[in-house]
Structure formats: C-alpha cells, structure tokens
Amino acid sequence: MRRAAVLGAERAAAAAPLLRAQLWGTAGHPMATIPPPQGLLRPLAVPQRLLLGPGPSNVPPRILAAGGQQLLGHMHPEMLQVMDEIKAGIQYAFQTRNRLTLAVSGTGHCAMEAALLNLLERGDTVLVAINGIWGQRAADIAGRLGAEVRELLKPPGEYFTLRDIQEGLARHKPSVLFITHGESSTGVLQPLEGLGELCHRHSCLLLVDAVASLGGAPILMDQQEIDVLYSGSQKVLSAPPGSAPISFSERAREKMLRRKTKPPSFYLDMGCLANYWGCDDKPRMYHHTAPINSFLSLREGLAMLAEMGLESSWDRHRANCTLLCQGLRELGLELFVKEEAARLPTITTVRVPEGYAWQEITAFLMKEHGLEIAGGLGPSVGKVLRIGLMGYNSTKDNVDRVLGALRDALQRCRRSRL
C-alpha cells in the first residue's frame, strides 16, 4: 500500500505541470473556463414603449441627458452642491422646512424600509392602515423589525376617515401610524387633513407613503403635521428608479435620537445619512458611494417640477385624470373608486370588464400599440386595470392614445369563457 501511495504521488507530481499549463496557459495567468455569454456579445436593444402603467414613467430628454453625464466623485464639491440642490427641491416638493431631508440611495421600497427601521425599535407598537398592497408591505417590514404591528383594515377602493383613525389610535396606542397617501394598487387618494394633529394628540408620529402621489396631488408636510414623508423618483418626477426623497420632522428626529439601540441597517441609518447629506452641523463624512447619475437625474426631475410649480402640476394631473375617467365611462368601463375626490389623479383603476381576461387586454396593448397599462397588484389582482398618467406622461395626447387603444382592445380581444 505504501508503494502504491508513492506511485500515486509520483504520477500526480508528473501531471501537475500539464494541469497547470491547461489552467494557466502560456501567458502566465489563470485561464477562464466559462465562455462569455452570447447575449452580452450582441448590441443592447431597448424597445420604445409608452409607459402608462403605475410606474415607472417615461423619462423626458432633459432628464435622460442629465443621467448620461460623465461621473463625478461622490465627495467632489460639485456633487455635494447637486445634493444640496436635491435637498432644497425635496423641501419644495414636500412643502417642508425640515432640516433632515435627503434622498435615499434606493427605490421607494428602500425609503419605506428606511423610515420604519429608523423610527421603530423591537417592541414598539405601530398601527398600519391597510387598504392596498403598500400597507401590507409596511406591516411586513415592521414585523421583521420586531415591532408590535396592529392593523387597521379597509376594503380595496376605500379610504380611512378621521373616525377610523381615532378609534385605532385610542385602541392600540401606537408610537407610529403608517398610512398611504396614493395607494397605487387600488387607485385611492387618502385624505390627510387633520391626521397629523390627531396623531400628535395621541403621542403618535404620522408616517406617510407618497410614492405614487407626490407632485400629482396636494401634500403639505409641515401644514398637515406629517412627521415622516417619502416618495420615489420614477413616478411624477419622471426620473429613473433608484433614488427616493424622504424627510423627517423634528418630532421624528427626536424619537430617533432617543433610540436605545442602533438602527439595524448601517446603509439606511439616518444618523449617518444626515451627516453625508449635510443635515447636521458636522463636516460631511463618507458613508457610501452614492448613485451619482441617479442623483443627477433626480435633480433635474425636481428642477422641472419647480419650474412648472406645484399648483400647476396638481391641476394638470387632476384635469387629465378627469378626461381619462370620462373617456373610460364612455367606453362602458366601470371606475373602481366610486368617490371622485378619492381617486388618485396619477393612477386610475377600472374594473376588468366582464367577459374579458385582463392579461389579454394588457398583452394586446403592448403588442399592437406599444403601450403599457397594468393589471391589479396585491388585493386588487384580477379585479382592476391600472392606468398611469404621471409627470412627463400626464398629457391630453396620452389620454386620447390610451382610450383609443382600449377601444381597439375591447373590440378585438377574445372574450373569456370563464
């Protein structure tokens, strides 16, 4: 056995140079054994489509050009100036003077998580108003953080009244109330008047999701006493997804300062991000490498909103939503949200017409008209079609185009036997 082992070792030693030559080749470094993917050896091909779903929106040429600029260093003075301009733009869009205002390096989901994980500690009670998928997501995230989650429920298509909230606050005594201003899965616009004052009477902070509504419907952070507000870049701001505006009131900042434990995420720790964004009195320090071109795009989206003016943007979205709703009714379609004032101006929902499969309608519009609308999401799956008119895409021409495409679909799509 000893001799066999010696022979085996000798053979292995003899084969080693050959094996090394196979792996390293003649260039003296390792050789790749997995070939390049064929798909990456072909030119990138991106189809041109009109995005009239719940987001993202089409990006206007000005914002595309901003995102195509050459990179700057994330700590260069010019980049810090861009970040300061973004902060001022968010303060305008949110209508707030909060010092702790910035953009999270991530999508609206990331901002939701940032808000919850900075506000909540294990054992804190949070009341989540759920009338669509975003309340469901917030409850999920809060539960993962170890919070005591209490749910306030409404059927899809309905909103919460002050009495609903009052009863929930009195019963559960939460430290935070989460509510969605623009519920994109159902097309509901949640009234906010009086909510902040009500929450503060119950020693509760008000956290509002405005991803689908910012710029398309009035929201006044300071006047409405909202403590934490966040949004996304890819809806009314018409920038690519990947950056998310967020702002914290002084009440919210003080709650975060009283934390007994550090936030469970370093990346989303508002103490670190506040310094990186120049929201405290300390010299700015490196925290993470920001998505430079996403921030350049967001800056231009905020600039375009500022140039138009919030009131003009709100009016335009409401006017085009009204035109769309009128045209949908003329096609014989039923609006999902009954009360006109409760319809989200940016995303309109209609019931899937009887006898049709929603998947066939959306696929037909994409194939025949190069146009996207969407089916339902979460609790509205199979119940509605969702049509978005946001930012750059909120125009009368697009209203006419989507109505014409739907008319064609209703005439030509195969009716379901179900």
Image (tube, rainbow, N blue to C red):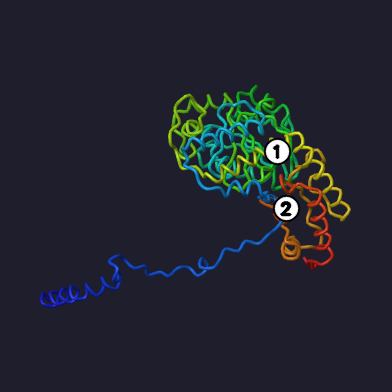
Please name whichever residue, 348 or 151, is drawn nearer the observer in this view of the structure: 348
Circles 1 and 2, Cβ within 8 Å, touching? The answer is no
Residue at image point 30% right, 71% down: 25
Q: Position of residue 196 (x, y in %)?
A: 67, 27
Q: Position of residue 373 (x, y in %)?
A: 73, 55
| C-alpha separation, residue under disc 1 versus residue under disc 2 | 17 Å
Looking at the rendered structure, the kind of residue marked 1 is Gly
Q: Position of residue 247 (x, y in %)?
A: 59, 32
Quarter occupied by the N terminus: bottom left
Looking at the rendered structure, the kind of residue marked 2 is Leu
Q: Residue furthest right?
A: 330
In the picture provided, is 46 more to the left or to the right than 413? left
Residue assigned mark 2: 52
Q: Residue furthest top?
A: 201
In the picture provided, is 270 more to the left or to the right than 307? left
Work out whether 365 lies above or below 251.
below
Residue assigned mark 1: 215
Q: SS at mark 2?
A: loop
